[in-house]
Each structure stands twice: as structure tokens, then as C-alpha cells.
Image: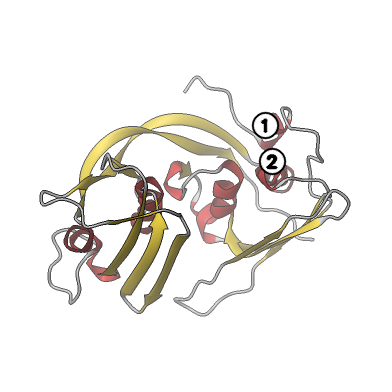
């Protein structure tokens, strides 16, 4: 709304002194996967000042690629259905001398060149969750070092173990709930977090399925709760995109 369109080309005009495009790129439709099963693999090897690196994305959607390129969550991207549905295998050679933080610019250039992507930004009121401390206080163990988030799922059962700041944990919850989650706990530092919940129970009012919903699990196991609110969120709107020619 009143802001200039964003394209990979526009961002690259301000790039640092390293190559602005992948040296070699292959984009192909991913082969079909078994019904009900989706496996995505992302592998990036950054090279050195003299040796190129390699990127391999297997079975990724264009929407996921946009998220990687512009460092935004999936709920922040508004696009045609096929952008989130169709899957691609992408292989590329990363130019020598490219730093890891230069990878998004290369992806933006790929999106512009191969998918003819044009984006614009706008602000939109979205329903979101605020992560807050429950009435009886938090059940969290402080730790000195952040080691990341490990999660696994068996059937409907989910298990997460993490050592992260709560702002990072809120980002993880955003992916699981497909809605923004903001850290409103007021708690600083790094915490050890272990939580188990049942996927099919991811509705606050659903108490008929064995195992707690994520809402109940957060409150009972961590002393945290999710409350609903609305807040302006920056949205990336796809104004134009094309399916790429394979090579």
C-alpha cells in the first residue's frame, strides 16, 4: 500500500561485493511422493574464497523458497494456490567468495530470473497468538547456551526439546500453528524446553482426543499460555509469478 514493489533485482542493486547470481542453476518439478507423505530436504554448502559451494533443495514449494529468500514466515506470503502446492528440485552452484548471509540475495535473483517473481509489501491485521506466562508462573529451566530446537513426530504425537530464548521458541510455534506467535512473556535469557502434545488436538476447545493439545501442553508442562489477539503484520503479496521452464 503505497510502498514500492520488491523484486530480487531491486534488492540486488544494493548487494555487497560478491557475485549476484548462482553460477549454474537447475530447476525441475519434483517427482510425486506417496500420498499423505511430504519429505523436504535442504542442503547448503558454502564454499571458500576460491572454491564454489553448492545448494540442493529437494521437494520444496515456491512459497518455501520465497520464505528462504526474504526471511519471512509462510503466513506472511499471499500467493496463488500452486505456489504453495507445486514442488521443485533445485540445484545450484554458489559462486566462490559468497558469504552465508549472501545466500538470500542469490535466491532472490533466482526467483526473479526463473519464476519472474514480483512482490509487494503491505501491512495487514492478522489474528495471532501472544505467548504469555500462565497464572501460576513459568515452569522453565534457565540454561547458559542456546543449542537449537529438536523435534519429532510419531503419528499424532509430537515431542520437542529445545534450548533457546523464548522469542525463538515463539517462531517455532508460528510454524506449527501457521499463525504468528509473539513472545509476550517478558522473560529474557535461554531456557531448556521440553513439551509433548497431540497434533489432532490443536484446537483449544478440543478435549476429546487422548493427549493434550498444544495449548494445554504449553500451560501444563511449561507454565505458558497462548492468547488470541490481532496486530498489523507485514505481508508479502505475489503480484506476478510464472511456472519455470525446466532445465
Q: Whole-percent x and y of residue 188? A: 33, 42
Q: Is residue 78 left or right of residue 28?
A: left
Give the crowd class for mark 1: few <14, some 14-19, many >=20 residues within 10 Å: some
Give the side of residue 211 with respect to residue 87, left or right.
left
Report the front residue among 76 and 185: 185
Q: Which residue is mark 1?
A: 11
Looking at the image, residue 171 sits to the left or right of residue 203; the answer is: right
Can you see residue 63? yes
Q: Image height check: is 9 above or below 96?
A: above
Disc sitting over residue 105 in the figure: 2
Q: Looking at the image, which residue is at 25% across and 62% down?
A: 214
Secondary structure, mark 1, is helix
Q: Position of residue 169 (x, y in %)?
A: 37, 53
Which mark, residue 34? none
User: Residue visible at 18% across and 77% down?
Assistant: 210
Element carrying mark 2: helix
- What residue is at 64 percent from the left and 73 percent from the top? 31
Instruction: Residue 25: tell me if it is visible.
Output: no
Q: Is residue 71 left or right of residue 221?
A: right
Image quadrant assignment for residue 152: bottom left
Total marks shown come to 2
Residues marked 1 and 2 touching at CB (< 8 Å): yes
Which quarter shows the C terminus?
bottom right
Cα gap from disc 1 to disc 2, whole angstroms: 7 Å
Is 164 placed above or below 233 here? below
Amino acid at each position: 500500500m503505497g510502498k514500492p514493489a520488491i523484486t530480487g533485482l531491486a534488492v540486488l542493486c544494493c548487494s555487497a561485493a560478491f557475485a549476484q547470481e548462482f553460477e549454474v542453476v537447475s530447476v525441475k518439478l519434483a517427482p510425486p511422493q506417496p500420498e499423505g507423505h511430504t519429505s523436504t530436504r535442504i542442503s547448503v554448502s558454502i564454499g571458500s574464497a576460491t572454491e564454489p559451494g553448492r545448494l540442493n533443495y529437494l521437494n520444496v514449494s515456491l512459497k518455501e523458497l520465497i520464505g528462504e529468500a526474504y526471511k519471512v514466515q509462510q503466513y506472511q506470503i499471499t500467493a496463488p494456490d500452486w505456489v504453495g502446492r507445486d514442488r521443485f528440485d533445485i540445484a545450484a552452484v554458489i559462486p566462490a567468495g559468497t558469504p552465508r548471509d549472501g545466500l538470500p540475495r542469490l535466491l532472490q535473483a533466482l526467483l526473479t530470473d526463473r519464476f519472474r517473481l514480483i512482490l509487494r509489501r503491505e501491512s495487514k491485521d492478522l489474528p495471532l497468538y501472544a505467548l504469555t506466562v500462565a497464572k501460576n508462573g513459568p515452569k522453565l529451566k534457565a540454561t547458559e547456551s542456546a543449542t537449537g530446537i529438536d523435534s519429532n513426530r510419531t503419528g499424532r504425537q509430537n515431542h520437542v526439546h529445545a534450548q533457546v530464548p523464548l522469542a525463538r521458541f515463539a517462531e517455532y510455534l508460528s510454524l506449527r500453528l501457521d499463525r504468528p506467535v509473539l513472545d509476550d512473556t517478558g522473560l529474557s535469557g535461554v531456557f531448556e524446553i521440553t513439551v509433548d502434545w497431540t497434533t489432532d488436538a490443536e484446537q483449544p476447545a478440543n478435549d476429546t482426543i487422548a493427549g493434550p493439545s498444544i495449548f494445554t501442553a504449553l500451560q501444563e508442562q511449561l507454565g505458558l499460555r497462548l492468547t488470541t489477539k490481532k496486530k498489523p503484520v507485514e505481508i508479502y503479496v505475489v503480484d506476478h509469478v510464472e511456472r519455470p521452464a525446466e532445465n
